[in-house]
C-alpha cells in the first residue's frame, strides 16, 4: 500500500483505530507473555537449585551417618 504522507500512513485509510489497536493489543500480549515466561523460568530455576542443594545436604548427612 502506498501512502502520500506520514499522516496518511497513521490514518491507515480511515481504519487507523482498528489497525493501531490491533497492533497495540498484540504488542501488549506479547510483552505480557515475555514477562510471564521470564518469571516462570526464574522460578523453575530457583526450584531446581533448591532441590539440588537439598539433595547435596541429604548426601552429606548420609556420609556423616556412616562415620559413626
Image (cartoon, rainbow, N blue to C red):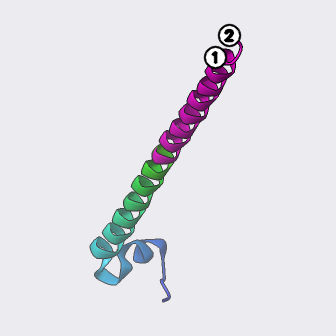
Front position in the image: 8 or 41: 41
User: x, y percentage for residue 51?
Assistant: 55, 35
Q: Is residue 19 left or right of residue 30?
A: left
Residue 65, numbered circle: 1
* Residue at the (50%, 88%) spot, across then down: 2
Choose top left, top right, bottom left or bottom right for residue 22. Answer: bottom left
Relative to residue 2, is residue 22 depicted above or below?
Answer: above
Secondary structure of the residue carrying numbered label 1: helix
User: Which residues make up the magenta segment?
Assistant: 40-68
| Residue 41 inside the magenta-drawn segment | yes
Q: Residues within 10 Å of mark 2 (few under 14, many from 20)?
A: few
- x and y percent of residue 36 in the render? 42, 49
The quarter of the rendered structure image containing the C terminus is: top right
Q: Is residue 63 above or below residue 14?
A: above
Look at the numbered discs 1 and 2 and tell me whether their residues touch, using CB distance below 8 Å.
yes
**Residue to which mark 2 is pinned:** 68
Q: Residue furthest right?
A: 67
* Residue at image point 59% right, 26% down: 58
Amino acid at each position: 500500500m502506498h501512502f502520500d504522507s506520514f499522516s496518511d500512513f497513521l490514518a491507515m485509510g480511515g481504519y487507523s483505530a482498528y489497525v493501531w489497536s490491533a497492533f497495540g493489543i498484540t504488542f501488549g500480549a506479547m510483552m505480557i507473555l515475555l514477562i510471564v515466561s521470564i518469571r516462570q523460568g526464574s522460578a523453575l530455576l530457583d526450584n531446581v537449585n533448591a532441590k539440588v542443594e537439598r539433595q547435596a545436604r541429604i548426601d552429606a548427612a548420609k556420609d556423616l551417618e556412616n562415620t559413626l
